[in-house]
Image (tube, helix red, strand yellow):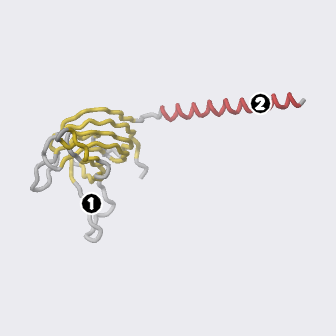
Amino acid sequence: MLITIILLAAGVAFSIAAASSSNIRMQSQATAQQPNEEIYRIQETAKSSAAPVAHTGNLPHAVVFALPIRDDGKIYTGQVTFTASKPIEVEVIHIYKPDQPPDEVHGEPPTAVINGTTITYSHLTGIVDNNIIIGDVPTASGTFEFTGSGLVFHKRSSEPFTVTYTIDAAVGALTQ
């Protein structure tokens, strides 16, 4: 009798474990098969070009748009690793649509208009390692996670650069 109970308990435990495992697999497959899900897995080497916007009195900045600006109510979330031929900066772009116009007391973040879309940006200086020197040439590299409406490798001067990057990002709708 005791052996029968043990065998019965073992059979029930095995059935529960198999059902749980099957359920987890089904959830993983469902997650991976979301309709209209956009995934960006990019590995590219790109040369900079002049930015589409020049600040007053300055030469156009040199830029590489690694992820184009989205103004469709969706954002990118992911991770990037890069290396560049010269010291550069990284900017995560955000669509700028304040609910209320900023006043003098609160101020306004830096903005630009690119192809009719007003943006602001997070200038990521802490993630770029500019202390790498190959021969006599300083370079830049880094890895970081980001969330935003676009991603730009950037140089404030018009000095050209080359950047190689790998991006693994998903696109999701904003909830607000």
Tell me which corner region of the image, top left, top right, bottom left or bottom right, holds residue 52. Answer: top left
Which of 147/144 is in front? 144
Which of 136/80 is in front? 136
Q: Residue at x 27, y 32 (%)?
A: 44
Residue placed under numbered mark 2 in the picture: 10
The kind of residue tagged 1 is Pro
Q: Residue at x 48, y 33 (%)?
A: 32
In the shown orientation, is residue 170 left or right of residue 65? right
Q: Position of residue 90 (x, y in %)?
A: 27, 47
Label 1 and label 2: CA atoms lie apart by 63 Å
Q: Position of residue 72 (x, y in %)?
A: 33, 44
The kind of residue tagged 2 is Ala
**Which dot marks residue 109?**
1
Q: Which of pointers 1 and 2 indicates the residue nearer the eye? A: 2
Q: Residue furthest right?
A: 1
Tell me which corner region of the image, top left, top right, bottom left or bottom right, holds residue 110. Answer: bottom left
Which of 61/105 is in front? 61
First-in-chain label (1 vs 2): 2
The reply to whether callout 1 and callout 2 are in contact (CB within 8 Å) is: no
Q: Secondary structure at mark 2?
A: helix
Q: Residue at x 41, y 42 (%)?
A: 172
Label 1 crowd bin: few (<14), some (14–19), many (20+), radius 10 Å: few
Tell me the quarter of the image containing the N terminus.
top right
Q: Position of residue 7 (x, y in %)?
A: 81, 28
Q: Secondary structure at mark 1?
A: loop
Q: Residue at x 86, y 28 (%)?
A: 3
**Which dot marks residue 45?**
none
Q: Position of residue 163 (x, y in %)?
A: 23, 38
